[in-house]
Amino acid sequence: AVQDDPAKKDLDSLQGSWQCKSLVSDGNPAPKEAVKAVKIIIKGNKLTWIGVGGGKGSGVATEATIKLGPSKKLKAIDLAVEKVETGLGIYSIEGDTLKMYVCNSMGGERPTELKDGQNVNSYEFKREKR
């Protein structure tokens, strides 16, 4: 049954627009202006990044397909960008706050804890009011 599916439940709770509140890459916090430009919009199993992309500058939208694995102790998230790579990460949702920790090196390992570190991009998003 659908209500027994934790991935479906988490995906439902992720729907909508999220404004980035903090972004830390390899332990280095991004400048406030850069953070402000970053938003994600989640619709179904598609995630659209706005204002973040492989050094392409702001305003670039990148689409990824989300795959969640919430059954483990650390909830897994895979962000598959077509023809590029799949970002392996972990996430937590508490109320209107979404945190994601995603490996930022090609073919790298999924982070093992919810904290900043080498080869990790850490994001904190706040849900935008509908």
Image (cartoon, grey):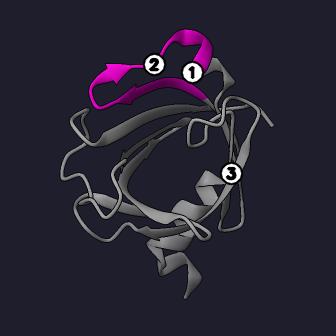
Q: Residue at x 47, y 79 (%)?
A: 4
Q: In this view, does 41 lie to the left or right of 30?
A: right
Q: Where is residue 47 in the image (x, y as percent from the top left)?
A: 65, 56
Residue underneath mark 2: 30
The one nearer the camera, 76 or 127, is 76
Quadrant in which residue 76 is drawn = bottom left
Residue underneath mark 1: 35
Q: How crowded is mark 2: few (under 14 residues within 10 Å), some or many (20 or more)?
A: few
Which mark is drawn over residue 59? Answer: none
Q: Which residue is drawn at 65% across and 37% down?
A: 56
Please, what is the three-letter code of the amino acid marked with disc 2? Ala
Mark 3: secondary structure = strand
Q: Which residue is drawn at 26% across and 68% down?
A: 72
Residue underneath mark 3: 62
Q: Specify start and end residues of the magenta stretch as a single range.
A: 20-34
Q: Which residue lies furthest to the right in this view?
A: 130
Quadrant, the C terminus:
top right
